[in-house]
Amino acid sequence: MKMINIKYVVLSVFLSLGISSCSLDTEPSDAIVDEKVFSTVEGNEKVLVGAWGYLMETFSTYANPGYGAFLRTNDAMGNDVVVSPKYGFRDHYAFTALYNRGGTNNFSWNLTYKTIDNANNVIEKVYTSTGGVMDKQRVRGQALALRGFMYLHLASSYAFAVDVDPNAKVGPIYLTPTKPDTKPRPAATVTEVYKQSISDLEEALTLIPTSYVRNLKYKFDRNVVQGLLARAYLYSHNWEKAAFYSDEVLKTYRQLMSETDYKAGFNDSSNVEWIWGHQQISDQSSASYQFHYLDVTSKESYYFSFNTDPYFKELFDDGDYRKGMIYWAPDPKIVNPQERDVAYMRYAKFKFKAGQIADIVLMRTSEMYLISAEAKARLGRGDAINQLNAVKEARGAKLASGLSGQALLEAIWIERRKELFGEGFARVDIVRNKLAVERKLYPQDLIDYEYQVMDNSGKVTTKTVKLLPQGHRITQFTDKTDFVPNSKYYLFRIPVAEEIENGNLYK
């Protein structure tokens, strides 16, 4: 995989990068660059393209591959991923990375606020640029959508559910570009940050034309914005609006992928079910690095980190084709396993494309069905179970029947765990639903593993060895207390540097 060096000049940092076919060259003086870049609607759009590239492709370490680092963190801290002891997200899995204010906290904070600042520059300046009115409105709408997306990340990552403490501090809200003399703002509450996210997304929806057709799937169109609104309203407990917006998306994206497509590796944004995804090409592929953690069955992968809890497989019905994608296996690079080598429960969901690249999924149709199902279940609507069963039927699972109330909600939450495994929702779902992480040790009884070898004459022989099964090794918090709801260990934390440098933070 090619690790690219892209120059990012991001206004408060300033921005100069090339992404895909868009290239933006700027000069080092802020005043000169500001005047040149923002004078046309095309220049504003290039800044927005650059801001997206900065968000998705920026690395601080190999374990922080852009925005995808936050998605991987969410799943590593959940119930179902068993992270190997190799490099990458093992501290997140052990609940030490965020609580100890490790690198992911600083990376999350800086990446989020720099992206917000980039969006703010476009939001403020695009209307005074030269160009068509509809293009200006669309670009401003897309910048608002990006900013709303970032505030949604902050609200769902830095505080518990809104009804646990509506006044919990999350982080400052900035609505204009920062300058050298900008005074740091106080931290807003989780209620205020959700409100800002939703306000940005709602306004974006009024500005992006219904006629707009994306040329690339990472761009914000109306369906992506509606999907983000469905998420934001679900997370902030507005069930009516969550049901409305998820159903709006399902008017366009109703088809669920086939079994063949499900088994193809979750690596291609052309998949019929992908509403939003970050595309990769051979010379623009830094974000693909996260597949070294996600892909646990290909020899092309390196870390094989995101294995599954053996008990996770038991959640699937017989006949559900996803169940057949989960199996015991040693390291894929091992040709001839030795007696008592370790085996992990491998889930063949994520696979590299040729050339070690892979598109990053950000939103799918199945998520919209499950948001619709959960929101309607909380409202007591009878069609909630139909939305759940749409996903189950597509995957060959046993259909739910006779469920209502809490039992139906729990069935939907389990389906989210099964369907959205590895896509970045686990920690958020645990926090927003006020649940505790659930992990238990797996018995260390040796298992039989069969593999085939070929001799020099071409004869194939099946051999069997005993392997040591690996399940969860972290079943408590770092202070040796049991997992509980609303734990401080579940949250991203404001960096120490921000607390020191922003004297207004807690005012």
Image: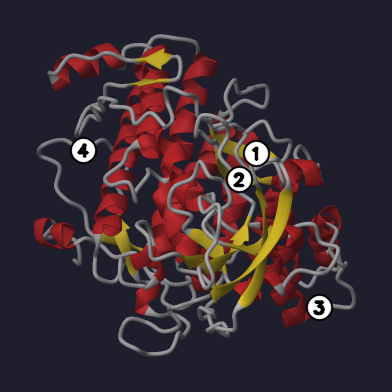
Q: CA distance from mark 4 to mark 1?
A: 32 Å
Q: CA distance from mark 4 to mark 2?
A: 30 Å
Which class describes the residues within 10 Å of circle 3: few (<14), some (14-19), or many (20+)? some
Q: Is residue 88 visible?
A: yes
Q: CA distance from mark 1 to mark 3?
A: 29 Å
Disc nearest the viewer among 4 and 3? 3
Q: CA distance from mark 2 to mark 1?
A: 5 Å
According to the picture, the residue beneath numbered tag 3 turns out to be 404
| Rendered location of residue 217, percent (x, y) | 59, 30
According to the picture, the residue beneath numbered tag 2 turns out to be 363
Identify the mark nearer the N-term, 4 or 1. Answer: 4
| Rendered location of residue 86, percent (x, y) | 37, 60
The colour style of the image is secondary structure
Helix, strand or loop for disc 4: loop
| Rendered location of residue 345, percent (x, y) | 60, 66
Disc nearest the viewer among 4 and 2? 2
According to the picture, the residue beneath numbered tag 1 turns out to be 275
Identify the mark nearer the N-term, 1 or 3. Answer: 1
Asked whether, in this view, residue 403 is left or right of residue 118, the answer is right
Q: Amino acid at mark 2?
A: Met
Asked whether, in this view, residue 420 is left or right of residue 60, the answer is right
Q: Amino acid at mark 1?
A: Ile
